[in-house]
């Protein structure tokens, strides 16, 4: 399996097919952070016409931005990767909860969107996504009611997970009363992990409950989440177990779907999942579905390190000329320079993730200058509070109040959920589009 990766090119953001997505439905409230001063709310399509520039200080900082060319590069990288293995992609939408990005991913070859809750599935459905894999158990009357409503749309395909007979019985009782069928995947788990059947006894109980549902609960395949493991040998063993169970269920006629689904892969081990599952010889065609969520924006911390390991161990990824690129940044002002070796920055825990490492200074820009320059390598955030961060600098560094610093982040999931709007910028730092989130 050999593939190549071309260099990302400059794009016309208004017309580029890879950014062609469904229009968003909600106006942009002037009360959202990260905007310039607005006299009134705007429709999303009006943003590009405002000719805002990040470097011209047309935006209120702190502000989160996405680099358009890097998004396109990452979309193409993953499209080529899954194509090399002949597998499907259902990226995890909880990372961004941004329907515009969901539709961008669907337009670039995704099979569906993975989500974690009924509310998230509803957001996707209301923005045009018609295939959702909910990588979680569906529990509770109102959550089931939300899914039941969406299933009235005959074009909508939905899967959730089951790992207990009781879960199957509750689903069967609810959906059979409405004359509906709920499609499920059997979740396989490990001792000490999260959801999933642990042993043959639990597995058999789930299968018997599915049979007893009289068609209300339909088993379409098998699912696991391997991201809780940190050892490659353990990951491979877990995947092989899931593949063996899938083979057994197919042989026993337990799976209703004409082409059974076998799904795994978070953002850390997706290469190993693709390798093991695509290398398994099944009795019939099986739809292998990978679910990484962080590839689209990537990061400069936790997932950069994980991706480096993928490049080391996986020949397909290694043969691509470039790796995934961090597309998400948070920009903030220098608020104060109270000491020779400390600057206080207007970025805090309400603006960027900090659970897997503090934001990292990447770019330094002084308003009025022509272009940003790389931040010195010795600059480092040492502490974050709600709205402030401490930046260690060196004596003599040219840092002034009002300077702008762009920060790369680690763990995009917990940066996206701090913003209702995120600007998409071109290579000249002009605002070309805007993304809304729905957490």
Image (cartoon, rainbow, N blue to C red):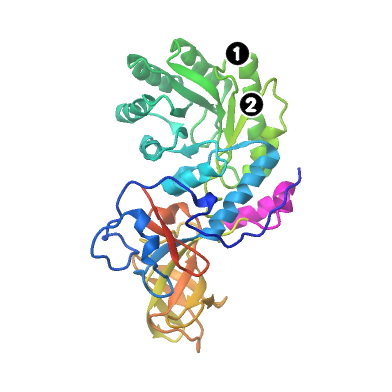
Residue drawn at x 37%, y 47% as measured from the top left: 24
Circle 1 packing at 10 Å, graded few (<14), some (14-19), many (20+), is: few
Residue drawn at x 44%, y 37% as measured from the top left: 129
Compared with residue 252, is residue 159 higher up or lower down, i.e. above or below?
Answer: below
- Chain-order first, disc 2 or disc 1: 1
Residue span colored magenta: 303-323
The front one of 100 and 189 is 100
Q: Give the SS element for disc 2.
A: loop
Q: Residue 50 at x, y = what percent?
A: 36, 65
Mark 2 lies on residue? 286
Number of marks in picture: 2
Mark 1 lies on residue? 253
305 displayed left or right of 142: right
Circle 2 packing at 10 Å, graded few (<14), some (14-19), many (20+), is: many
The verdict on residue 235 being magenta is no
Q: Are marks 2 and 1 in contact (CB under 8 Å)?
A: no
Residue drawn at x 29%, y 57% as measured from the top left: 42
The front one of 72 and 89 is 72
Question: Can the viewer see residue 334 in this picture?
Answer: yes
Residue drawn at x 61%, y 50% as measured from the top left: 76
Residue 191's label in the rendered image is none
The front one of 233 and 262 is 262
Nearer the observer: mark 2 or 1; the answer is 2
The verdict on residue 310 being magenta is yes
Point out the image quarter for the N terminus.
top right
Q: Give the SS element for disc 1.
A: loop
Q: Residue 190 at x, y = what percent?
A: 56, 33
Question: Can the viewer see residue 301 in this picture?
Answer: no
Compared with residue 49, is residue 123 higher up or lower down, i.e. above or below?
Answer: above
Q: Residue 149 at x, y = what percent?
A: 33, 27
- Magenta: predominant secondary structure element? helix
Q: Residue 203 at x, y = what percent?
A: 54, 21
């Amino acid at each position: 399996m050999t593939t190549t990766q071309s260099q990302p090119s400059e794009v016309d953001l208004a017309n580029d097919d890879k950014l062609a997505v469904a229009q968003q439905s909600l106006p942009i409230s002037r009360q959202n952070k990260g905007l310039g001063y607005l006299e009134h709310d705007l429709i999303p399509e009006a943003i590009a016409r405002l000719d805002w520039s990040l470097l011209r200080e047309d935006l209120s900082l702190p502000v989160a931005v996405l680099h358009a060319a890097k998004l396109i590069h990452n979309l193409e990288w993953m499209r080529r990767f899954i194509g090399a293995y002949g597998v499907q992609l259902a990226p995890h939408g909880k990372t961004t909860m941004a329907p515009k990005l969901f539709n961008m991913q669907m337009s670039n070859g995704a099979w569906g969107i993975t989500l974690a809750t009924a509310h998230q599935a509803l957001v996707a459905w209301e923005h045009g996504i018609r295939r959702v894999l909910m990588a979680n158990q569906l529990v509770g009357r109102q959550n089931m009611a939300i899914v039941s409503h969406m299933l009235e749309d005959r074009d909508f395909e939905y899967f959730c997970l089951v790992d207990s007979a009781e879960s199957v019985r509750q689903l069967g009782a609810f959906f059979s009363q409405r004359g509906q069928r709920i499609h499920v995947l059997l979740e396989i788990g490990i001792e000490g992990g999260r959801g999933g059947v642990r042993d043959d006894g639990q597995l058999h109980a789930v299968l018997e409950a599915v049979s007893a549902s009289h068609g209300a609960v339909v088993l379409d395949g098998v699912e696991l989440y391997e991201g809780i493991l940190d050892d490659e040998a353990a990951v491979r063993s877990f995947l092989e177990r899931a593949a063996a169970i899938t083979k057994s269920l197919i042989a026993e006629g337990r799976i209703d779907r004409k082409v059974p689904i076998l799904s795994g892969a978070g953002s850390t081990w997706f290469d190993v999942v693709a390798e093991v599952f695509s290398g398994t010889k099944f009795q019939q065609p099986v739809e292998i579905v990978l679910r990484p969520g962080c590839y689209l924006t990537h990061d400069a911390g936790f997932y950069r390190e994980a991706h480096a390991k993928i490049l080391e161990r996986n020949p397909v990824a290694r043969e691509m000329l470039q790796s995934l690129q961090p597309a998400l940044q948070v920009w903030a002002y220098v608020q104060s320079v109270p000491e020779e070796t400390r600057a206080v920055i207007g970025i805090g825990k309400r603006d960027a993730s900090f659970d897997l490492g503090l934001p990292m200074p990447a770019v330094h820009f002084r308003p009025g200058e022509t272009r940003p320059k790389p931040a010195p390598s010795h600059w480092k955030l040492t502490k974050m509070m709600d709205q402030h961060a401490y930046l260690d600098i060196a004596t003599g560094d040219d840092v002034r109040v009002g300077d702008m610093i762009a920060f790369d982040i680690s763990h995009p999931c917990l940066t996206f959920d701090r913003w209702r709007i995120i600007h998409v910028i071109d290579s000249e730092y002009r605002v070309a589009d805007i993304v809304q989130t729905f957490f």
